[in-house]
Image (cartoon, rainbow, N blue to C red):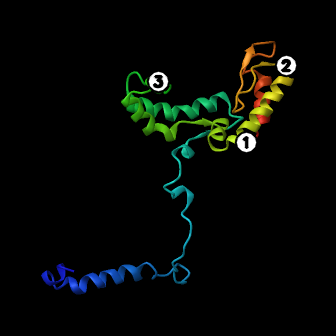
Amino acid sequence: MLLMPLFPALRFTVPVIAAACLLGGCSGSTSTGTPKVATLQSADVAASPSTSVDDQRPLVRLDASDEEREDSIKLWAACVFKLGGPGYEDPRSLIWHRGEAKAEKIRVACQTKEPETYEQRQQRTDIAAFRDNQREWYKCAKEAGYKLTPPEEDGQFGLTEVGPNGDFGSAKMEDCRKEAFKE
């Protein structure tokens, strides 16, 4: 300790402060008069630094109405426009400006406000369950008479033609999707 000869008061001050800090963490009492005891506990998941930003995104329920879906986008859209200004009135403009530094800064700043569907979250967090649900959706849609492309490796599929049942937004297709992806 080279500082001790230069500052003699530090010889006593440093150990006293260190002891006070160490003992202060275990002293005190709760409102019930029981002394506090230091414990080893896992950090709260919400406070954990390893919590993904994606996990903070708003989730659009399977049974959300069109109005609820639109409302879930408003906060994200406002953030994108506030940071982007003209040319960023529509949050999808982040896709159109992909690769630009400004768009990337906006995307990062607003990503906790960007809503995601139940399917998107499941695909991101549990690919096996997502694939199973995609297979169920495909099977139901096929049985309902939709003309479909063969499923890809992750289970996603498309329409080969729009028939009498309609397209992906049709009532029967939505019923199959909701049945397959029940929360």
Residue 50's spot in the image, x, y percent?
51, 54
Q: Is mark 3 in CB contact (under 8 Å) with mark 2?
A: no
Q: Is residue 89 left or right of residue 140?
A: left
Front position among marks 2 and 1? 1
Q: What type is the residue that disc 1 sits on?
A: Ala
Whichever of labels 1 and 3 marks the residue nearer the N terminus, that label is 3
| Labelled disc at residue 66 | none
Task: Report which residue position mark 3 lands on.
Answer: 93
Residue 107's spot in the image, x, y percent?
45, 34
Give above or below for 110 relative to 89: below
- The residue lying at 70 percent from left, 28 percent from top is 152
Task: Report which residue position mark 1 lands on.
Answer: 129
Whichever of labels 2 and 1 marks the residue nearer the N terminus, that label is 1
Callout 1: SS: helix
Q: Nearer the viewer, residue 163 or 149?
A: 149
Q: Nearer the viewer, residue 142 or 37?
A: 142
Q: Is residue 176 left or right of residue 91?
A: right
Residue 61's spot in the image, x, y percent?
67, 38
Give above or below for 78 relative to 40: above
Residue 8's spot in the image, x, y percent?
16, 85
Total marks drawn? 3
Q: Would residue 25 be visible to someone looking at this image?
A: yes
Q: What type is the residue that disc 2 sits on?
A: Gly
